[in-house]
Image (cartoon, grey):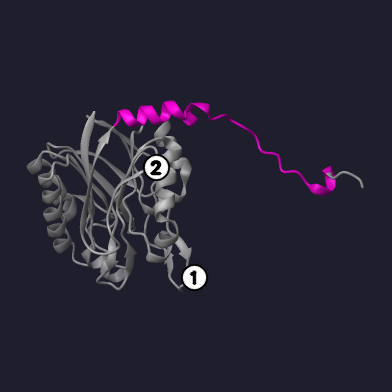
Amino acid sequence: MTFKVAAIQMCSGVDPDQNAADMARLVREAASQGAVYVQTPEMTGAVQKDRAGLMAVLKDEANDVIVSTARELARELGIHVHVGSTAIALDDGKIANRGFLFAPDGNRICTYDKIHMFDVDLDNGESWRESAVYRPGGEARVAELPFGKLGFAICYDVRFPALFRTEAVAGADVLTVPAAFTRQTGEAHWEVLLRARAIENGAFLVAAAQAGVHEDGRETFGHSMIIDPWGKVLASAGGSGEAIVIADIDVDQVKAARAKIPNLKNARDFTLDTVAAEAKGVAA
């Protein structure tokens, strides 16, 4: 089965209402080009590194403008809309970095909360502690759609191959990595990580990204991509500003790739033995 997918590249600011309007415009354009599945980036609702500023605009799921706008877009356009993620207020005072998938009738199919927190210190002085603000998820997710099975991840999750392998073994044909990669890490690792996750799992991969210099001063890498199960980049965007990346996906290619290199079936359990050289060394 062949279908058209789109990755929406954005440069979200600090105002969720404006970001929702930008998202709606871009999703409608992607749908007009034939996309039946449209993915937006991580933190579609607001890229805001100031915690107080983020908390000031934060809403729970029932009142979030990105959630309501995506639901209406899915219903209006008759497509699947995947909000890569947006910040959602939780009852315990923390925040979920939560993705949403809506069906063509506007009903919510599922959510996914980012599992791995971006707690890093980079060479250029950037320091991030997502765990101080966000509550990590604890559940991988695969959604069964009419055209195939969709596996979920968000940004930093891409550095944890076991998540993608678990979803692929569960039958995921399409893996997703909506992101807001920093420029420094993106230049070094973005494409190679995405292609590796596609290749090692014999799956398509769709990655919508934030791109450019944001209103809060943060800079993200962009280069939204759609990749096939053999690791070929089918479509990609530049490193700044809005873009719509579109490609056709034929899920039969997933079966073909996994038949050629059946590493999902060939995997074996094993044990690990750490050997102490002084105990096992050979006498001279």
Q: Residue 82: within the magenta?
A: no
Depth check, front residue: 79 or 55: 79
Residue that mark 2 sits on: 231
What residue did someone put label 1 on? 123
In this rendering, is residue 48 above or below 153?
A: below
SS class, disc 2: loop
Magenta segment: does it hold 262? yes
Q: How far across and down, in percent of the image, does residue 103 sit?
A: 17, 37
Q: Is residue 154 visible?
A: yes
Image quadrant where residue 78 sits: top left
Camera-side residue: 74 or 16? 74
Indicate the amino acid at tag 2: Gly
Q: Earlier in the sequence, mark 2 or mark 1?
A: 1
What is the tally of numbered marks visible in this picture? Answer: 2
Residue at left offset 44%, top offset 41%:
163
Rendered image: mark on residue 24: none
Please name the amino acid that badge 1 sits on.
Asp
> Magenta region: which residues?
251-280
Q: Is residue 28 left or right of residue 3?
A: left
Q: Is residue 128 left or right of residue 252?
A: right
The Cα atoms of the two marked residues, 2 and 1, are separated by 29 Å
Task: Give the quarter of the figure containing the N terminus.
Answer: top left
Horizontal and vertical percent position of residue 251: 29, 31
Q: Residues within 10 Å of mark 1 (few under 14, many from 20)?
A: few
**At which x and y percent is residue 263?**
49, 31
Mark 1: secondary structure: loop
In this picture, residue 25 sits left or right of residue 225: left
